[in-house]
Image (cartoon, helix red, strand yellow):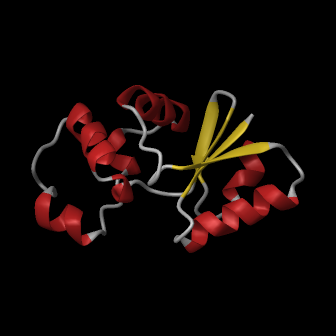
Amino acid sequence: MIELYHNPRCRKSREALAYLTASSREFKTIEYLKTPLSAEKLKDIIEKLGIDPLELIRREESIWKKNYKNQGLSDQDLIQLMIDEPGLMQRPIVIYGDKGVVARPVEALDNLL
């Protein structure tokens, strides 16, 4: 099952939703701002993306720059930060099987699916 971690206020996330809808593939949409992720789930997503936790952080956000940049946060700290501040996560995230992508641009889904 394809999983879309979605923020409906994000244009790129809406593009991924439209892409998946047009593909006629079955998928599940998770609005992660409404349904917070557990640490275990977030670790699993990061592993499937094949990235470090810092790469999943939106480092251009003012809250990151003001409160967390250059703080030397550990991977565990970064995971907890994304749980506490889910708006700091890159989006949209699409997971399919044991792989995933941050679908920016949406064409990144071509290689995943």
Figure disc tally = 0
Name above or below for residue 40 compared with residue 113.
Answer: above
Q: Quadrant of the N terminus?
A: top right
Image location of residue 12, percent across then percent down: 59, 68
Q: Is residue 92 left or right of residue 113?
A: left
Camera-side residue of 62 and 55: 62
Image location of residue 50, percent across then percent down: 50, 35
Picture quarter containing residue 112?
top right
Q: Quadrant of the C terminus?
A: top right
Name above or below for residue 91 compared with residue 46.
Answer: below
Camera-side residue of 107 and 2: 2
Camera-side residue of 50 and 92: 92
Give me the residue at 70% from left, 60% from top.
17
Give me the residue at 41% from left, 30% from top.
43
Q: As drawn, which residue projects farthest toward the right?
A: 24
Give me the residue at 86% from left, 61% from top.
22
Image location of residue 84, percent across then percent down: 27, 47
Picture quarter containing residue 67?
bottom left
Give me the residue at 34% from left, 57% from top.
88
Name above or below for residue 49 compared with residue 24.
Answer: above
Q: As drawn, which residue projects farthest toward the front?
A: 34
